[in-house]
Amino acid sequence: MIEQLLGGPQGLSSGGQYGNAFKWIVDTNAMREASLVLGAEEVMNFTSRTNVETPKQPILSSACPGWICYAEKTHPHVLPHLSHLKSPQALTGTLLKTVLSKALNLRADQIWHVAVMPCFDKKLEASREELTDIYWRSDSLAPNIRPYVRDVDCVITARELLMLADTRGISFPNLPCKPFPQLPFPNPTINTFFFPTHFTKHRTPRRPQSREAGTSGGYLHHILATHLSLHPLNTLTTTPGRNPDVTEFTINSPTSPHPVFRAARYYGFRNIQNLVRKLKPPKKSRMPGATAARTKAASGCLDYAYVEVMACPGGCTNGGGQIKVDDLPSQAKQSEKLTGQKEWLARVDEAYFSMEDSSSDEEGASSAMPAFTNAEGDSMMLDIDNEDNIQAGSGSRGDEINGISPSYIKSVLDHWAQMTGIPLEKLVMTTYRKVESDVGTVIGGAENKRVEELAGKVGGGW
């Protein structure tokens, strides 16, 4: 239905002053899969002690902008622990701007990319200077020639999406659930990657996430699955924490008396505060010759290889930009027997885990290869059924982990770097910096008082 709203004939193109719609509607899950593969590779490089540069142990996930903002402003000591990878939103933006500008001979500022997210803090992420074309465009284009261009121009939340439909006089619930014919993306390999079943029969649709993957993209789950695929005799043990938003995972080997891999999941600011305290460097002792010592809890935290951190209690399905139970009409709440946010969130989680790839519905999908016009006005036709594309899009490689083929994902990423002429590291990696802020400072009260107030807001990010 989102696809129909943004690009379908009964969506934005039928309402508003200009009757405009979007050329391509891309599922962020495509680059989420790339992020999962790259994230697992980052952690495996660390645990195998390769020479590849990796963050400090434990590696902390970096896909949540509320968590990143909190770390940069109040706890810069954790910045060396943050994963270097961009989030799926940022990766999608970088790919769209680089590939389309190259394929259509356009400047990055001539491409408008809007992301639909469950989180208001994704707006903050999109405004980061590190996520602009300065970090990937050719060195020959000096920064003073023109202002930098964001990889993601605009972010709207699920709640704002409904507001957009209302302002255009469009009934969102009445939009067709069927997919509509989209123009092929102007790069055959990327086209197959973005639209696995729209234009080819040689790649299976994306699978719904399992409940074990969690409600925030499944980063930790994929890392654990990758480790177990490399060591099939090892076993995984899950230990619940003091509350549902903290879970510890341990992988044991039959040949070792000690755990070979430890990881954890920390959701919500109250739990995150405990995590960052444990990661804080120990104070130096004033006694001559004495060495600083860590507490037992802090030492255990440092044993983690990876920690999935999300600002919102319950994860991303409880994001501040998600539709809340109070947003529903009273008649809908009565018919669905919803008495509060807890019951509504359970429905949201159920929908999240049972999601279906709309492109898997053959009805309404395009069977022909439509043409489109490039920047020069020439008619172009994409032949995506060539041998290379069939091989690239094939889902029968035999190395799938949770339905994702690492070799296929890496081949797409390598193609991306080669066709744009930009090193892959520039395309997929990012950096962080300490931000001076009065948040968390002593202003007539205890340290971190304002942060604790923010942490008490259930269902919101930074």
Image (cartoon, helix red, strand yellow):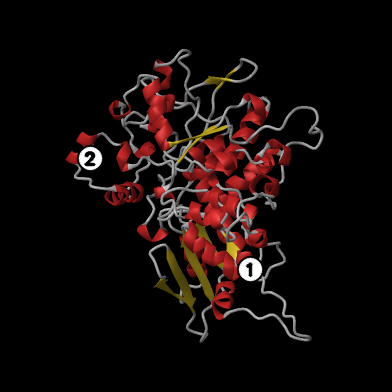
Residue 367 seen anywhere in this rendered image of the structure: no
Residue 45: x, y in percent?
63, 65
Residue type, numbered disc 2:
Lys
Relative side of 143 to 15, left or right: right
Q: Quadrant of residue 242?
A: bottom left
Q: Which residue is mark 1?
A: 280
Local SS, label 1: loop
Residue type, numbered disc 1:
Lys
Residue sitting at 23 percent across and 47 percent down?
339
Residue sitting at 39 percent across and 53 percent down?
209
Q: Quadrant of residue 54?
A: bottom right
Tell me if mark 2 has few (under 14), some (14-19) or many (20+) residues whose alpha carbon lies within 10 angstroms of its own.
Answer: some
Residue 404: x, y in percent?
47, 53
Depth check, front residue: 9 or 14: 14
Local SS, label 2: helix
Relative side of 347 to 64, left or right: left
Q: Are marks 2 and 1 in contact (CB under 8 Å)?
A: no
Q: Is residue 183 above or below residue 268?
A: above
Q: Is residue 24 above or below residue 376?
A: below
Residue 148 seen anywhere in this rendered image of the structure: yes
Residue 75: x, y in percent?
63, 59
Residue sitting at 71 percent across and 62 percent down?
53
Residue 104: x, y in percent?
63, 25
- Work out which quarter of the rendered image holds the N terminus and state it: top left
Q: Is residue 388 above or below residue 311?
A: above
Q: Quadrant of residue 37?
A: bottom right
Depth check, front residue: 129 or 213: 129
Considering every residue shown, the one lying at the far top of the view is 17
Q: Which residue is mark 2?
A: 333
Tell me if mark 1 has few (under 14), some (14-19) or many (20+) residues whose alpha carbon lies within 10 angstroms of its own.
Answer: some
